[in-house]
Amino acid sequence: MSPVIPIPIHLSSASGVPFYKQIFDQMAEAVCSGELLPDSVLPSVRDLSQALLVSLITVRRAYADLEAGGLIIRRQGQGTFVASKIEAATRRRSRGEAQDALGEAVQKARRLGLSAEEISATVQEALAAFGGRDE
Amino acid sequence: MSELVQLRGLRVVRGQFSLKVQSLSVGGGEVLGVVGPNAAGKTTLLELLAGMLGAEFGMVQVFQLDPFEHPAQVRSRLGYMSDDLPVFDLKLSRLMEMISRYYPTWDWDLCRKLLRDFDLSPSDRPSKLSKGEGTKLRLVLAMSFRPKVLLLDEPATGLDLGGRRKLLEYVLRTAGEEDRCVIISSHQLADIERIADKLLVLNNGTVIKQGMAPELIGEGRTLEEALIAWGAAG
């Protein structure tokens, strides 16, 4: 009955995060993690709107942002697809997210009274503990 | 995108109450959510668009016609649903057959599908239905002829979760067609927030806010919180 969407998207109405942003975040993550493969077809705006029970404008906005970020492309008359080359955009995005997460960790460490050297050492330890070597 | 519904300089006076809307337009493919506290003027607005009321001042156009002056031409393509709309107490199959004759575009396949989706049986009678089932029946009647303009006044009254989700699905499916639009008034703010492209916020007969829904609501708050911030919570 309802159109099939390739990845589960969960929308929370209580979060205060606009729906278009929730859709953007979850799809961007699925694209960047490779869960959505390059060139795979995405549902139309209309189908996604009906599947998620959100307005057309919401889905249009999420798709426009994903397109602007180079994660998806729209081909005239064919539909919407995951971009073929997403590495640059993905790396930029992943780096941005990692920076945010590390930034927060550093701030917290500062508040807890750690010195710059102590923080640096802690990051090295974490790297060692959680797989420091690149594959 | 053609405008299906247009208002300019509207003023309606009903005793102590008056409704003023400077300008409003709804085009094909759009869902307009009308929100505001009780007695804000939501029902009056929808009744005007359905041609059930005339305006003292201003222009009201649906399909480029004044619905009060041309009720038959407008109503044949406009679905109006309100949970207190009277219906004849006939077996639903009889009732549908009777009402279908008024609408050249009546779609029996869609009608049967709506009845199934809303768990109604053609052998039911309106007087035996619960409040929520009565709401569902009125939705089926308003939607079975594939109206180009669908007006829903508090369409979720008494609906269970499944019924509400079906309602949202049908609203989005209607607006998913580029030559059809939906205007929905509701206190179910979370639902409106989900499905509305545009919002009209009324309070005491005056427009408090109007525009594209994501911009109006902004980030970091829900529609409910926005309404409270605008002083339109009632």
Image (spheres, coloured by chain):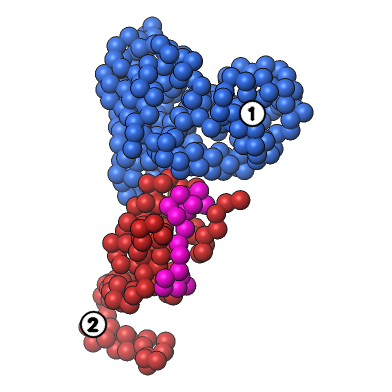
Residue underneath mark 2? A115
Residue nearer the viewer, B67 or B164: B67
Mark on residue B115?
A: none
Mark on residue B137?
A: 1
Q: How far across and down, in percent of the image, does residue B19 sit?
A: 34, 17
- Identify residue type, mark 2: Ser
Whether residue B204 appears in this view of the structure is no
What is the magenta range? A35-52
Give the drawing colour for chain B: blue
Question: For the point 45% across and 62% down, which residue is it?
Answer: A42
Whether residue B96 appears in this view of the structure is yes
Please give the chain letter of the residue carrying mark 2. Answer: A
Give the drawing colour for chain A: red
Vertical arrangement, residue B136 with respect to residue A4, above or below? above
Question: Quick check: is A89 in the magenta stretch?
Answer: no
Vertical arrangement, residue A33 with respect to residue A48, above or below? below
Helix, strand or loop under label 1: helix
Question: For the point 35% across and 41% down, which residue is it?
Answer: B213
Residue nearer the viewer, A1 or B145: B145
Residue nearer the viewer, A30 or B219: A30
